[in-house]
Amino acid sequence: MTRRSAAACVVTMLGVAACRQPPEVAFVTDRFEIAPEFEGELCGGNVAFMEARLAEIEELLGIEARGKIRYNWVEDISGFCPDSASACADGTTIYGPWSLFEHELVHAVAASMGQAKPFLAEGLAVAFSAPMLAPGSMMPSDWLDFDPLETQGVDDAYSYATAGHFVRFLYEEFGAEPLTRLYRMSEPDDSEAQLRGQFERVYG
């Protein structure tokens, strides 16, 4: 992504007019450019966690993020993300607080597959970042008795929790290959009928 000037507004892939200038990159690793809004050093485990989670997500899904991921570590995401969001990823550029980094990291990795219908996109991010859903934590059926992580709707029809549970089920039952194939077929504006048709073509 091109750097935004303080005087100009740029419309991002998310359709948001950004008139703020993001923080300057202060730390560079093999896989990340980290631009925190605060001064000083990062905590000792931050970079190790970022690198480990990126490698794990790529391995689980059998895909690779495009180039370096830029993390704009900001608490106030206004001007960078949609008004309804708490954080966001624009391709491989992330905006948001540390508490939501892992969720947005999944979006940044998935950007290499294109943009999918929100039900799949948010379902993937929840399934591979939520502590109670991420592979290795617990089985999807064990999670059913827990309260949903969020009640915010996806496409006004599904909750993030439902989408995450469904994607995790597909991953556990059928593996990564058909899931990523379905993701690549999907487009953000697909109708429910189109998504059902894509699902049937992939999973029968």
Image (spheres, rainbow, N blue to C red):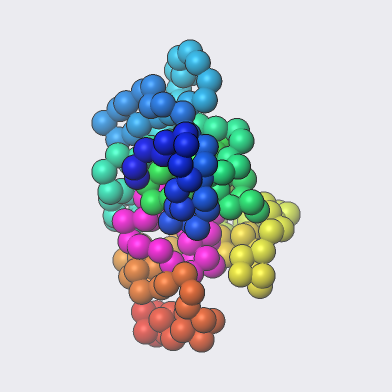
Please determine whether, in this image, residue 201 is positioned above or below residue 145: below
In this rendering, does residue 78 appear at all?
A: yes
How many marks the image carries: the answer is 0
Position of residue 119 measured from the top left corner of the image (x, y, whole percent): 54, 67
Residue closest to the eye, 156 or 51? 156
Q: Is residue 112 magenta?
A: yes
Q: Quadrant of residue 98?
A: top right
Residue closest to the eye, 57 or 10? 10
Q: Residue at the top extreme?
A: 40
Specify the quadrant that holds the N terminus: top left
In this rendering, does residue 129 appear at all?
A: no
Q: Quadrant of residue 62?
A: bottom left
Specify the quadrant that holds the C terminus: bottom left
Q: What span is in magenta?
A: 101-126
Please determine whether, in this image, residue 4 is positioned above or below residue 64: above
Residue at image position (46%, 84%) is 194
Query: Magenta part mainly helix, strand or loop?
Result: helix
Q: Is residue 161 magenta?
A: no
Please determine whether, in this image, residue 58 is positioned above or below residue 113: above
Please determine whether, in this image, residue 44 is positioned above or below residue 64: above
Residue at image position (47%, 34%) is 6
Please indicate whether residue 42 sits to the left or right of residue 138 in the image.
left
Q: Quadrant of residue 179?
A: bottom left
Residue at image position (73%, 54%) is 147
Position of residue 81 measured from the top left corner of the image (x, y, whole percent): 55, 48
Position of residue 67 measured from the top left corner of the image (x, y, whole percent): 26, 43
Please indicate whether residue 179 sits to the left or right of residue 79 in the image.
left
